Amino acid sequence: MSVTAAQGFTAAGVRAGIKASGNHDLALVRNDGPRKVASGVFTSNRFQAAPVVWSIDALADGSLDAVVLNSGGANACTGADGLADARAMAETTASALGTTAQQIAVCSTGLIGVRLPMDAVRGGIAEAAAALSSEGGADAAVAIMTTDTVSKQASTTSESGWTVGGMAKGAGMLAPALATMLVVITTDADLTPAEADTALRAATRLTFDRTDSDGCMSTNDTVLLLSNGASGVAPDLEEFTHALTGVCASLARQLLADAEGASHDIAVTVVNAVTEDEALDVARCVTRSNLFKTAIFGNDPNWGRVLASAGTSKATFDPDQVSVSFNGVTVFDTGALGEDRSLVDLTPREVRVEIDLAAGPASATVWTNDLTYDYVKENAEYSS
Amino acid sequence: MSVTAAQGFTAAGVRAGIKASGNHDLALVRNDGPRKVASGVFTSNRFQAAPVVWSIDALADGSLDAVVLNSGGANACTGADGLADARAMAETTASALGTTAQQIAVCSTGLIGVRLPMDAVRGGIAEAAAALSSEGGADAAVAIMTTDTVSKQASTTSESGWTVGGMAKGAGMLAPALATMLVVITTDADLTPAEADTALRAATRLTFDRTDSDGCMSTNDTVLLLSNGASGVAPDLEEFTHALTGVCASLARQLLADAEGASHDIAVTVVNAVTEDEALDVARCVTRSNLFKTAIFGNDPNWGRVLASAGTSKATFDPDQVSVSFNGVTVFDTGALGEDRSLVDLTPREVRVEIDLAAGPASATVWTNDLTYDYVKENAEYSS
């Protein structure tokens, strides 16, 4: 499990005093080599947080020695001072680990618009650097939690002898006043920077990019892959990408399952679309419909709201040929009323909605949550 | 007030027995001439309800004698049978009024996917035709209500001697299991079909098109303008468009004010954008953010959520130059913390958020509601 599952990675999670609660709030993940290959994908939000700006630059050479992460403050919308703080986090970490700041990625999560308590951060970095251990993955996963109720970890080992492991926190921007999905994945497979980048983009495209808890895009979202080749095995890239996608999918599902206020995890699958992009477009129209999401909260297989939201898409289809099923029951069949909606049981947490466009060969799935009283409560009652 | 404010229009609203509640549920609005000019704008949803399909066709010649409207059933996603029902409504109305079906527009609102009780509808049409009166506007406005708590009417009279009046129901797709904003506007100004169409499109673009209660697009949305020239005055088109826009704006605000579950009406204004389209794009990104909408419900001037949603727009701006104000208090000023957020009072129902992009000369406003417990309750607890 976690970021220390693969050979040659150490990690730590400590209580630096950034969070008022006194909980764990600073994590380090170090790549002990031999290779220091790294790749990352970041939020496309125009208001990128300072640590995102820093990390994109640090990753330009495809190499990282370590990642420093904090909870308790997002360091977003903090201007030039915030950027200086992100740089200071990298420099302090580099100094503790005997490398250069350019080899350090920085991730922050917590309130937007608040400066970090840098004395506490510096102390935490020193403490975490001293605590780095091949057993430290679980502590690191705890230290990046904000309103997460459980830490999120996943790993898989190939028969060829390499391992991929990772940790994650958050759920889109679902958490109250918080703004981050952070993911760090490590592997001892031997990859070139280009291979790491190709695999990471392919894996996130099918997993995190299709996890949309509440349609809100964070300023801090970061997914990092560190690779050191310590297994001595250069993997088949297709096999590695498949394994990496599995780890990402597991972490993404763990994020949804812990999304605050949610009572259902919903997979909206669009089949028989002309292209995958059109399938995705229809799925996103449905997963962003508040009326659809409240219906699922009410255990209501409301195909009318599915159609009304699908109807806002530009995808190619004939409305008279469309079918909709909930958990396998086709309640709207080829443009007309189908099976009796009372046959649908929406009480389990996992719900599967399938929309058949009868237009082509492509399909796509987007995961989301339902819209509940608790979502409103969490996001209305807490100031940020 | 209402659709009978202008000369030469009669209307009626009756209890046809379509609604289980026994409330008023069928309305007629008749243009008594001399001219029978008409224009309409309709939902862009791909799943157009049968009455929308019918009415678009009926309007192809720019002329209508009357509009028949029912609540208690949307006649949407009802296939060929539903289209036959819409046609039968037009034929029954035409027969009662001594005209042709092609001169009748049809509007329906209520549950999606349910056939209308056509015997009740036919009886109601006969009763309404017999009750048509120049005093009938208020009854008609009541008969199109679904979960509206008040009827919506507006009118204005020009110094040149012509009047514009209208009625409306609904609020986007906010109402539980319901799916319609219906608007009928009448005027005794003397307009050509082209003038009526130009004025209606200009007015709706700035009003109903910028009212977005919950981001959900209906299958039945219809706005009709009937013009008969009974005042004998051919208006200045700019003056008429201005008056029509005022009536539309009043009706749109009445819809928002009665939106179910909402506790705030929120105007998001984007100023100093490069183009009006870009201003609109940023405003829509913000008004569709559930995190922003829950924050307003919580009386929280959460500029971080405004920025995070604005940051998903493709509009041209430099994040370091952006400012955000709530009710006139600039809490985020030129890329940095501004006035103290505690100066903002969000307890009044009306909230004004202004986003200054510092990028150009254009601006736009979109109105929305907050996201509340009651919104979730209304839309989760009622099946459809």
Image (tube, coloured by chain):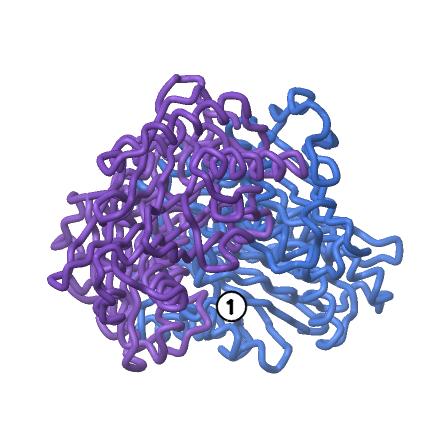
Chain colours: A purple, B blue
Residue A119 placed where, x, y %?
54, 21
Q: Is residue A89 above or below residue B316?
A: above
Q: Nearer the viewer, residue A12 or B234?
A: A12
Q: Nearer the viewer, residue A296 or A266?
A: A266
Residue position for label 1 = B44
Answer left or right for B349 relative to B180: right
The crowding category of the residue bearing disc 1, from other C-alpha atoms within 10 Å (few below 14, some 14 to 19, many at least 20), is: some
Q: Is residue B141 above or below residue A357?
A: above
Using the rendered image of the protein, determine whether residue B139 is visible from the camera's viewpoint. no
Residue B190 placed where, x, y %?
79, 69
Q: Nearer the viewer, residue B234 or A121?
A: A121
Which image quadrant is residue B185 in?
Answer: bottom right
Q: Nearer the viewer, residue A284 or B236?
A: A284
- Say which residue appears at 60% left-offset and 55% top-offset: B133
Answer left or right for A237 relative to B223: left
Q: Is residue A356 above or below residue A294?
A: below
- Say which residue appears at 44% left-offset and 75% top-offset: B91
